[in-house]
Amino acid sequence: MSALDSIAEARDFVARFGAQALADEALARASVLQPALNTLITTLPNDPVVPDATGPLAGIPFVHKDLFCTRGALTTAGSAILSGFVPPYDATVTARLRQAGARCVGKANMDEFAMGSSNENSAFGPVRNPWDLSRVPGGSSGGSAAAVAAGLVPFATGSDTGGSVRQPAAFCGITGFKPTYGRVSRHGMIAYASSLDQAGVLARSIEDCATVLSVIAGPDPLDATSVDVPVENYQAALGAGVAGLRIGVVRSMFGAGVRSEVAVTVRGALAELARAGAILVDIDLTTLAHAIPAYYVIAPAEASSNLSRYDGVRYGHRAEDVRDLKSLYRKSRSEGFGIEVKRRILGGTYVLSSGYYDAYYLRAQQVRRLIAEDFARAFTGVDVLAGPTTPDVAFKLGEKVDDPLAMYAADINTVAVNLAGLPAVSLPAGFVDGLPVGLQLIAPAFAESRLFAAGQALQGRTEFHLAHAPEVQS
Amino acid sequence: MERSTIHKLADLARLDLSPELESRLADDLTQLLGLVSELQQVDVDGVLPMAHPQADRAMLRADVVTEGDSVDALERLAPDMSQGLFRVPKVIE
């Protein structure tokens, strides 16, 4: 183990050598690996820390997905349209991490505005997977996942709108935790689809996810969609065990399109939980078949509305040589946005336009309720739901970039969770062809504790989360 | 998707598209609409639309000023600003 592999190791190092020494270690490793992995958009050698912090993350270095606003430090959301954008304020997640003593050493590369599942949509170039440099790390939190998997930092932040924390965690062999919608403040987190976006945590172990979520969770007066429900004691939950825990194994999540070796690997991890005392029950959620279509109406609709704010007037990129106000808007936006963002803005504009609103947007929202109700019904009989996080292991760079529908289809097991606003985690479950596979567990709203208990039970019996990526061994 | 439709969408979304990009995105959108058209098969009679997972728990805060005047900070971010005002090309002839 290195000092950058876990929060406990990092704490130990800080106690002996000081926080600056550990930050320097992280920055040195980031600099060595940057040419191969491209995980960071900005490095922060001198990010301010709370002096004499004694919080749970005192002196612990981390990488921050580049859509969390950081006062005084460039924040791009992976887009050229935010070139030069240095926020005058901190996101609530940033502020809470700082308050707990954490030390931000860099802003992580990501798919532009979090739109993507491969990190190939970044204006700053693709991130590569530390397990195989010819493969994608997943997205949109690809830089965050690769940074943790490569041992740059013990944890990273991410955001999850349709799987953007869980899928890259699965592809990079680490743990990715997506809390309940409303559990973590979205204030200062650059918006993609506001009713789906939620901040999350990526780390090797579920234990470290618990430590970080305990710091960032809780209501925030600056975000009216954060929810005033008491934050459970996640540290205590880690030790709760899974004896008698009923796990609903969702049949369709192992169905068509899921590679058989991936299904077998995930079932192996579930068998491990059964040996620890969990009860496995097969379960059907028939509405999940509609999750991809509903998501790819709702998310673009919200994106087209959210991204209308980028107009070249108040901040970010502004085009030169324009005739009038409208051409200022058009030229600035066309130069600043990448193709996937334009694709989703146009799709969203279509489904919200007069004559199509009822047939697409309204209907997708009705289907969304059916999906949420289906989950609620399932949770009357089981405590958590399980399936593979992704249908296959990490794919090759360039493999799906010209086929957006194939890219969207791979989100099949993750998007329903966002539509219903539920908490979920991707846990390292084993390997296929030497590449990591993730087990996804889903809990009812605000029942994060169940995921921590189950995750810790698995990681107490397996060592998949401790495996090191071969491409970055030092 | 008709050329005129993608043209109108681009105008509504304030985007300039080259002819090549316009044709590529028209194909992509046609495929996307094919994908989402299966929603038409779902029986949604009497189902209330769900806009938001926690719509009944929205938190309101007191209507008081919490941040002071931040014109200076915003001015530093703006591509073109003077005397506290954003400058844009002339709107009225």
Image (spheres, coloured by chain):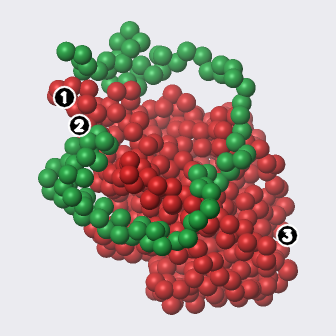
Chain colours: A red, B green
Q: Is residue A264 shown above or below A422?
A: below
Q: Is residue B6 shown above or below A269?
A: above
Instruction: Give how far across and how far down residue A309 sits, in percent.
Output: 41, 35
The residue pinned by badge 3 equals A240
Q: Chain of mark 2?
A: A
Separation of disc 2 and disc 3 at Cα?
Answer: 56 Å
Label 3 sits on a secondary structure element that is loop
Q: Amino acid at mark 3?
A: Ala
10 Å crowding of disc 1: few (<14), some (14-19), many (20+):
some
Q: Quadrant of residue A137 in the image?
A: bottom left
Which label number is shown at residue A322? Answer: 1
Label 2 sits on a secondary structure element that is helix
The reply, left or right, for residue A42 in relation to residue A262 is: left
Q: Amino acid at mark 2?
A: Lys
10 Å crowding of disc 3: few (<14), some (14-19), many (20+):
some
The residue pinned by badge 2 equals A331
Mark 1 vs mark 2: tell me if same chain. yes
Whether residue A179 is visible: no
Q: Chain of mark 1?
A: A
In this view, the mark in front (1 or 3): 1
Q: Quadrant of residue A275 in the image?
A: bottom right
Taking the spot 51% from the left edge, 61% from the top edge, the residue there is A364
Taking the spot 28% from the left edge, 33% from the top edge, the residue there is A329
Residues at discs 2 and 3 in contact (Cβ within 8 Å): no
Q: Is residue A102 shown above or below A179?
A: above
Residues at discs 1 and 2 in contact (Cβ within 8 Å): yes
Whether residue B19 is visible: yes
In this view, the mark in front (2 or 3): 2
Q: Chain of mark 3?
A: A
Separation of disc 1 and disc 2 at Cα?
Answer: 8 Å
10 Å crowding of disc 2: few (<14), some (14-19), many (20+):
many
Question: Depth check: A126 or A332 in front?
Answer: A332
